[in-house]
Image: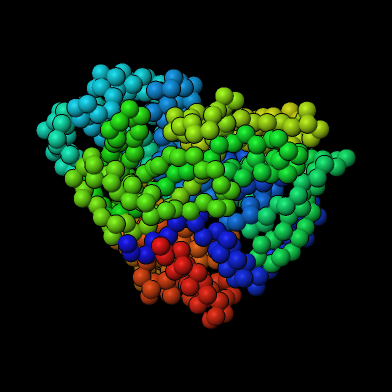
């Protein structure tokens, strides 16, 4: 197997390397610690990010602290979908499906550059999975529950309803499917989320542009109750500096780590999370332009996806209980080979280990059922959320978020901030996040924005404008306004034939709180998430980022070495 990387399986080594690099930078926590906050949010994944955005728009003074980089936990380990949760219909969670479908539409409205319509082919084979009649009913209900799916959505992102293909039409649409026993397929639609890590960061950066505070690489190691609220102790992992932050309320949004922080603050007996491990692999492109929703033979009717993504295929996910500490998450060779076997068992892809170009893993924080028994199936476990206010435990204003999913994170934040508004003194604005666009997301359609930007930057080639708008929406204007951007010839291809531009890298390094090369590659621009770029490209980009951030020659060499370590199996 060629060199790859797990997102999380080298966390201890990576953190040490990041601290060594970041110690050279000016990261004084003093100015942040001198302020008084309405709330402090612990955790910079999608849950913490959406809470920060909501609280800031309502007029609350908020600070977010994240122990690694933003979006560096579960948020960077998704299937890169914004979906309504079709499979939750089998467990009769109609409320969760309706919520997911509503939030799917909301994200398409407030961050149109962050989602793309994605068709899914769901094939039927004799004696495998659910019957055609059962899925016909499920998809009819799915469309009925999403009756308003296109309300307020830009025209080029609207979703059609489902339809059926007979056997020959199915094979014509997707020849990689195994024809043995194939009877036909349904096609339905959700959204792809091409860069969920960046979208998470955009919630944080949008909040900061409205007055919020946030800092990555600051680990919270203690939360104390005070007469006026809470004192939060944090340490900068890059500089080693410690500081104490004061707030009237604290939100524990640490995802798979949330129950540990809860127990540390409140005492023993608080753990109620089950951690479900999911891995994905990225391979050569094996399907066409639609995703495949495939079902494995067997009584559990487990499914997985083959997703088209950046001229590659994402295959996943697994769903198994993980009982170790979240920091010990890794990916085993047999897990990767299991996914390959799954694909080959129901398609004609003929994947091999050497076709795997990258892999990653994450932990889903699931709310533990009171009747849960050891060994229970996490695949069928509910994706419900729980907001716990620990007032009865003597900690009024200390909230913990358990569970949750990317698609419904905005609504979760709304519910939590509603409760904060009731708890905190003073009056606050009503929730606006359902309609307020993120920075970069305020445009009618991509084609309209492209015409506007072409008129503003007539010397810039159209493919470049189109690419930058596709990644950053309206923020593309700020990149193109940099000196020399229109005629800049320096660009790179990151193994997917996608071009990345010198001024784009310069803009991100200057504006997006990048502390090391991995932040750029994996959570801002997506340079490294489809496989390892060339050695020449890595060196040139590291040197350019280094000029923006003041790195020495040895710093640049160390950053390149640390980056390459992420791709070793």
Q: Is residue 191 above or below residue 13?
A: above
Q: Is residue 561 above or below residue 438?
A: below
Q: Residue 371 occupies which quadrant of the picture?
A: top right
User: In which quarter of the view is residue 13 placed?
Assistant: bottom right
In the image shown, does 298 or 355 lie closer to the viewer?
A: 298
Residue at 54% across, 50% down: 73
Residue 211 in the figure: left or right of residue 336: right
| Quarter of the picture holding the N terminus | bottom left
The residue drawn where x is 53% and y is 33% is: 374
Q: Quadrant of the C terminus?
A: bottom left
Residue at the image position 19 percent from the left and 40 percent from the top: 177
Q: Give the residue at the far left of this rendering.
A: 168
Q: Residue at x 70, y 48 (%)?
A: 63
Residue 451 seen in render: no
Measured as percent of width and height from the top left, residue 518 is found at 50, 63
Residue 530 percent across, percent down from the top left: 37, 57
């Amino acid at each position: 197997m060629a060199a790859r990387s797990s997102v999380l399986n080298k966390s201890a080594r990576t953190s040490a390397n990041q601290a060594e690099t970041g110690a050279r930078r000016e990261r004084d926590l003093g100015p942040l610690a001198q302020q008084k906050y309405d709330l402090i949010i612990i955790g910079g994944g999608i849950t913490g990010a959406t809470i920060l955005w909501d609280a800031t728009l309502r007029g609350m003074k908020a600070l977010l602290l994240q122990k690694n980089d933003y979006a560096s936990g579960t948020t960077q380990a998704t299937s890169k979908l914004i979906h309504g949760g079709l499979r939750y219909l089998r467990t009769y969670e109609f409320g969760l499906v309706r919520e997911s479908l509503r939030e799917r539409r909301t994200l398409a409205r407030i961050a149109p550059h962050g989602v793309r319509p994605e068709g899914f082919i769901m094939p039927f084979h004799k004696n495998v999975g659910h019957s055609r009649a059962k899925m016909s009913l499920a998809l009819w209900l799915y469309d009925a529950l999403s009756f308003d799916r296109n309300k307020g959505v830009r025209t080029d992102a609207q979703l059609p309803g489902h339809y059926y293909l007979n056997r020959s039409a199915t094979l014509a649409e997707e020849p990689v499917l195994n024809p043995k026993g194939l009877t036909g397929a349904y096609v339905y639609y959700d959204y792809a989320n091409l860069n969920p890590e960046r979208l998470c960061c955009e919630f944080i950066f949008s909040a900061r542009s409205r007055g919020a505070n946030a800092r990555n690489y600051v680990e919270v190691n203690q939360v104390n109750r005070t007469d006026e609220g809470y004192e939060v102790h944090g340490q900068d992992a890059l500089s080693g500096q410690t500081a104490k932050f004061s707030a009237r309320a604290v939100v524990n949004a640490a995802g798979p780590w949330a129950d540990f922080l809860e127990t540390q603050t409140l005492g023993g007996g608080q753990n109620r999370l089950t951690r479900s491990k999911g891995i994905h692999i990225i391979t050569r492109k094996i399907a066409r332009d639609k995703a495949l929703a495939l079902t494995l033979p067997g009584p559990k009717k487990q499914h997985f996806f083959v997703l088209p993504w950046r001229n590659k295929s994402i295959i996943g996910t697994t769903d198994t209980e993980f009982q170790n500490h979240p920091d010990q998450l890794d990916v085993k060779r047999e897990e990767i080979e299991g996914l390959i076997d799954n694909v080959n068992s129901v398609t004609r892809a003929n994947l091999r280990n050497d076709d795997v170009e990258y892999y990653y893993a994450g932990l889903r924080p699931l709310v533990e059922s009171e009747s849960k028994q050891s060994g229970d199936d996490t695949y069928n476990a509910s994706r419900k959320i729980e907001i716990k206010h620990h007032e009865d435990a003597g900690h009024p204003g200390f909230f913990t978020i358990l569970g949750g999913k990317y698609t419904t994170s905005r609504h979760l934040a709304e519910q939590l901030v509603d409760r904060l508004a009731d708890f905190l003194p003073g009056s606050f604005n009503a929730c606006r996040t359902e309609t307020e666009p993120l920075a970069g997301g305020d445009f009618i359609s991509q084609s309209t924005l492209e015409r506007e930007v072409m008129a503003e930057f007539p010397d810039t080639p159209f493919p470049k404008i189109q690419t930058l708008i596709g990644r950053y929406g309206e923020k593309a204007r700020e990149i193109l306004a940099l000196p020399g951007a229109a005629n800049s010839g320096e660009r790179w291809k990151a193994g997917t034939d996608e071009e990345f531009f010198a001024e784009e890298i310069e803009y991100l390094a200057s504006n997006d709180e990048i502390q090391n090369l991995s932040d750029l590659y994996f959570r801002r621009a997506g340079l490294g998430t489809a496989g390892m770029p060339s050695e020449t490209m890595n060196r040139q980009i590291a040197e350019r980022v280094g000029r923006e951030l003041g790195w020495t020659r040895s710093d640049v060499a160390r950053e390149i070495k640390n980056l390459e370590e992420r791709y070793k199996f």
